[in-house]
Amino acid sequence: MIGRLTTLVAIAMLLSAPTLAQDWKSKYPELVVAAAPAENPTAIITRWLPVADYLAKELGVKVTIRPANDYAAVIEGQRAGHIHIAQYGGAGYARAVITGVATEPFLVQMNKDGSKGYYSVFFVKKDSPYQGITDLKGKNLALVDPNSTSGNNMPRFELNRMGIVPETFFKQVVYAGSHENGITALQNDTVDVAADSWTNDTDSNLMRMARKGLVKYDDFRIVHTSPLIMNPLLAYLSALPDDLKAAIRRAFMQLPEKNQALFDSLYDGQKQPWQPVDRAAYEPTIELIKFVDDLRKKKRGP
């Protein structure tokens, strides 16, 4: 009797599995993926469109890439439920969490050397006279975006440690809108120093721009480097069904194995396959963003 009951249960589970999958496919006939704007929207689409095609084949539903004009667009898109999967920088994810967006990190970028972090740096032009931050008093600073980890929050944190208030120390502080725009502003002498992300001499936004022929890597140098920052991550909406989340995780994790060339093109061959991650890994970044928020409140006053 017990053996027969076990068999019936097993048969029922097998019969219900396709139904469960079909349930989420009927509710989510299209999945939207968005990436934080490290590059211009056209470059983001070019880089991510083949990934969307791969995901569509693996998941069996339409997958659309939505380029974001700024970090807030990714956060608000997930808040509204319009963006199902997002590539965040650490600060963007932290801002989403702090402001109540129900999103869950599931994979983290891995550097080629096996590490999971990068740095915020201040770049100046190589032929400039500036040797450190204190030499830049009264000059122009380019940050990236209010929700950028390496392009705003960590730079402000580091400047605060030096006793520097950016808006009074520098002649002008501007938000460039993207990492590329900040370097371009520095190259064109619109600003004298630019905050950006950097992992090592072969893996950075500056090197990516150099590979595209937009700048020469050796035309710039670093005058300050932050402590290590946790790498960007992939996060999906918490409200997605568990079986859909599992399918998304599996598809991303299998991408390097199934199409190494596609994975390499996504990160210019500078990353190892993603690894699982959860919110706990980003708690220090969340605390950093809370610190930055407190600084802003103090500047505004009671």
Image: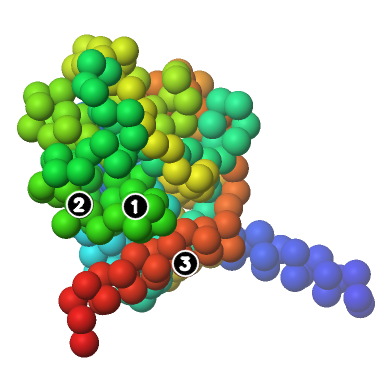
The amino acid type found where label 2 is placed reads Phe
Label 2 – label 1 distance at C-alpha? 10 Å
Dot 1 amino acid type: Leu
What amino acid does circle 3 point to?
Glu
Q: How far across and down, in percent of the image, does residue 241 sit?
A: 48, 66
Tell me which residue sits at (50%, 45%) in the image: 227
User: Which quarter shows the N terminus?
Assistant: bottom right
Q: Which residue is mark 2?
A: 169
Q: Which residue is mark 1?
A: 159
Instruction: Answer with left or right where residue 117 lies relative to residue 10.
Output: left
In terms of secondary structure, where does tag 2 sit?
helix
Q: Is residue 32 visible in this depiction of the protein?
A: no
Depth check, mark 3 against mark 1: the one in front is: 1
Please tell me the numbered disc located at residue 250: none
Which residue matches tag 3?
287
Screen quadrant of the C terminus: bottom left
Q: Residue at x 66, y 59 (%)?
A: 14
Q: Secondary structure at mark 3?
A: helix
Residue situated in front as seen by the camera: 14 or 39: 39
